[in-house]
Image: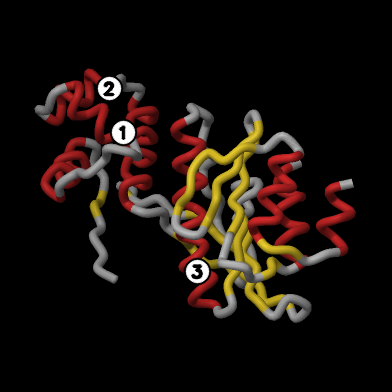
Amino acid sequence: MLYKILSKATMTGKVLLKLLENNGWRLDRICGSHHIMIRRDKTLSVPVHGNGDLGKGLLVKTYEGRRFKEMKVQYPAKIRYTKEDKSFLVEFPDLEGCVTAGSTIEEAQKNAKEALTGYLASIFDRGYVIPKPSKAKSGNIYMIEPDPEVATPIMLRRIRDEKKLNQTEVAKMLGISYQAYQRLENPGTCNPTIKTLEKVARIFEKQLTVEFV
């Protein structure tokens, strides 16, 4: 029933949120203009831009989503223009339910970063395995990075898992306390210095890239 409603109608993000809540979803967090909704092990990003309608394409994708290495976290996002909605629809092939849109390609990329940040933080906090990003396989693919406070904990955990180390062992290698390292792996408290990241890169033979945009 919900699929039929979404495939034939337009509605605001606020109305969609109410529909989702009536179908067992609950709000996990708000990241900018995106509401991250969860139901059991499922996660959805819902863009709420004032009272503006969400396009049919985005609504359907939201529903369908339900059912010496470089130190960098990036996910491929497929961004395509939909004539019906006159907007750019964004999908993350590796992340079910992580979708958004924008009126311009620049706005779509900005919203993609916001949605990705909230989506990954939600999965991370709930202890679910974060899917590894796949390689771009077609056109209209843009590599999107989450905000540093989310990217860094994910990156550190991946490195630690690769090396089969626990947090205590990594803390000793970095010369910091166990509690200090725990904060580095927490999206809510992560705020590393460049010096700390350089040390991580050196110890684990990674390349640290710092970009100013």
Q: Nearer the viewer, residue 128 or 1?
A: 1
Give the labeled residue for mark 3: 109
Give percent across and percent down for residue 117: 45, 51
Q: Amino acid at mark 1?
A: Glu
Helix, strand or loop at mark 2: helix
Tags 2 and 3 touching, CB below 8 Å: no
Q: Earlier in the sequence, mark 1 or mark 2?
A: 2
Q: Amino acid at mark 3?
A: Gln
Give the labeled residue for mark 1: 185
Give percent across and percent down for residue 41: 63, 31
Distance from Cα at disc 1 to Cα at disc 2: 9 Å
Left-right relation of 31 to 177: right
Give percent across and percent down for residue 159: 34, 35
Left-right relation of 169 to 138: left
Give the labeled residue for mark 2: 167
Q: Nearer the viewer, residue 213 or 110?
A: 110
Q: Nearer the viewer, residue 44 or 80?
A: 44
Left-right relation of 17 to 30: right
Which image quadrant: the C terminus?
A: bottom left
Q: Nearer the viewer, mark 2 or mark 3?
A: 3
Tags 1 and 2 touching, CB below 8 Å: yes
Helix, strand or loop at mark 3: helix
